[in-house]
Image (cartoon, grey):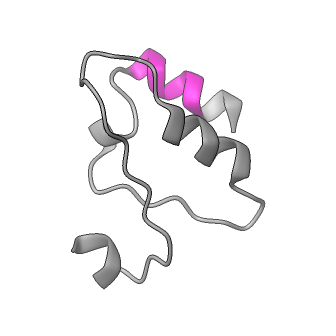
Amino acid sequence: MELRSAGCDAIVQEHGSGGSRTRPALARLVREIGAGDTLVVVRLDRLARSVSHLLNVIEVS
């Protein structure tokens, strides 16, 4: 897996419809990520569905 080879310790996967904005695993990750932690994604579209959604994710962090 790409993330393991990049040295990632924890891997979070979201399961659900691609059209749904309900992302409980992402919400939990955003709450738990701490100062100094690094979030690595395989592709940016795996983190957010649109630019406005990405800005929302970034603001919550």
- 60 within the magenta span: no
Q: Quadrant of the N terminus?
A: bottom left
Instruction: Give the quarter of the image for residue 61.
Output: top right
Q: Where does residue 42 sit, x and y in percent of width and height? A: 28, 57
In the displayed structure, does residue 58 sit left or right of residue 32? left
Tell me what residue is drawn at x 58 percent, y 64 percent. Answer: 38
Instruction: Give the quarter of the image for residue 37.
Output: bottom right
In the displayed structure, does residue 37 sit left or right of residue 19? right
- 53 within the magenta span: yes
Residue that lies at the very extreme toward the right in this rendered image: 35
Q: Nearer the viewer, residue 13 or 3?
A: 13
Q: Name the magenta segment's main secondary structure.
A: helix
Residue that lies at the very extreme toward the front in this rendered image: 15
Tell me what residue is drawn at x 68 percent, y 55 percent. Answer: 33
Q: Where does residue 4 sit, x and y in percent of width and height? A: 33, 79
In the displayed structure, does residue 32 sit left or right of residue 20? right
Q: Where does residue 28 sit, x and y in percent of width and height? A: 62, 42
Instruction: Give the quarter of the image for residue 35.
Output: bottom right
Tell me what residue is drawn at x 39 percent, y 39 percent. Answer: 47
Q: Nearer the viewer, residue 61 or 15?
A: 15
Compared to residue 49, the image places residue 12 above or below, namely below
- Which stretch appears magenta? 51-57
